Every structure is written in structure tokens, then in C-alpha cells.
Amino acid sequence: MKFSLIILIVCLFLGCKSINPLLVGTWKGEDGYVNNTIANKKWVFTRFANGTYTVNFKYDFNGKFTELTENGTWKTKNNIYYEKTKEMKKYDSFVFEIKNDSTIKYTAIKLDKTTDVASKNVYSFIDHKITK
């Protein structure tokens, strides 16, 4: 909580644009759906106050493991979260709902066709903040 407050104060004075400081930090999540198949996908997602991010994915397809690291940019406007890699033509967009200081729910609005869950009708997930 103190970290988020410090980021908020810095952003107010330095003019951080389109970054919700409550989303800055390291988060983890899990999903059971990838490319129309049932799989286990886990991630550790770090959002930086400068609008960049790194996410490390671990996929488990029936005991066959794959890891992937993705880097990109992110921003927010109102309660909409946007993220984009350099390979993507457009931002993925999600409505985000802050449940508490350590839990945020995201529900997809529009996904780039290259996103691994783009074919899913309704996609949502929950991130949990990792505290040290």
C-alpha cells in the first residue's frame, strides 16, 4: 500500500500520464484456456511506472511445458487497461476492477488477433499482487 501511495504522489508531481499507480508492481495469475485447448497457463506480470511491462508465462499442456517472456507497453484510461507488444497492431483492452490492494479482475473488451485467447467469447482473469 505504501509503495502504491508513493507512486501516486510521484505521478501527481511528475505528470505520469495514463498510468494507474495501483496496477504498478509484480502480479501473478493463472488460466486454464489457451488457443482453444485446455491447458494450464501461469504468469508473473511486472508493470513499471514508466508504462512498460514484462510478463513471464508458463504453459503446461498435459505435462509438456513451454515458457515465454513478453515485453510491451501498458496504459490506463478510466477503468480500461491497455497492453501491447511491438508485434501487435492494436492494444488489447480490458475493463479492470480493483477488488482490494492485492486483487484485480480484468475482463477483455477487445483483443488483438495474435493474442492466445482472442477466440474465446468472454475472457477474464484475476491478478494477485506479489508482495516481498
Image (tube, rainbow, N blue to C red):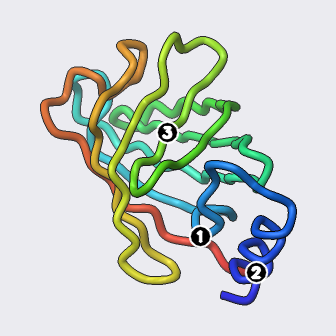
Q: Which residue lies under the disc numbered 1?
A: 22
Q: Pointer 2 and pointer 3: residues touching (CB < 8 Å)?
A: no
Q: Which residue lies under the disc numbered 3?
A: 82
User: What SS does tag 1 mark?
Assistant: helix
Task: Give the label on residue 3, or none.
Answer: 2
**Residue type, label 3:** Tyr
Q: Residues within 10 Å of mark 3 (few under 14, many from 20)?
A: many
Q: Is residue 92 left or right of residue 52?
A: left
Between the residue at mark 1 and the residue at mark 3, the CA separation in whole angstroms equals 14 Å
Mark toward the start of the polypeptide (1 vs 3): 1
Q: Nearer the viewer, residue 43 or 118?
A: 118
**Residue type, label 1:** Leu
Residue 24's image quarter?
bottom right
Q: Is residue 36 above or below residue 94?
A: above
Q: Is residue 73 left or right of residue 57?
A: right
**Residue at point 43% right, 55% down?**
78
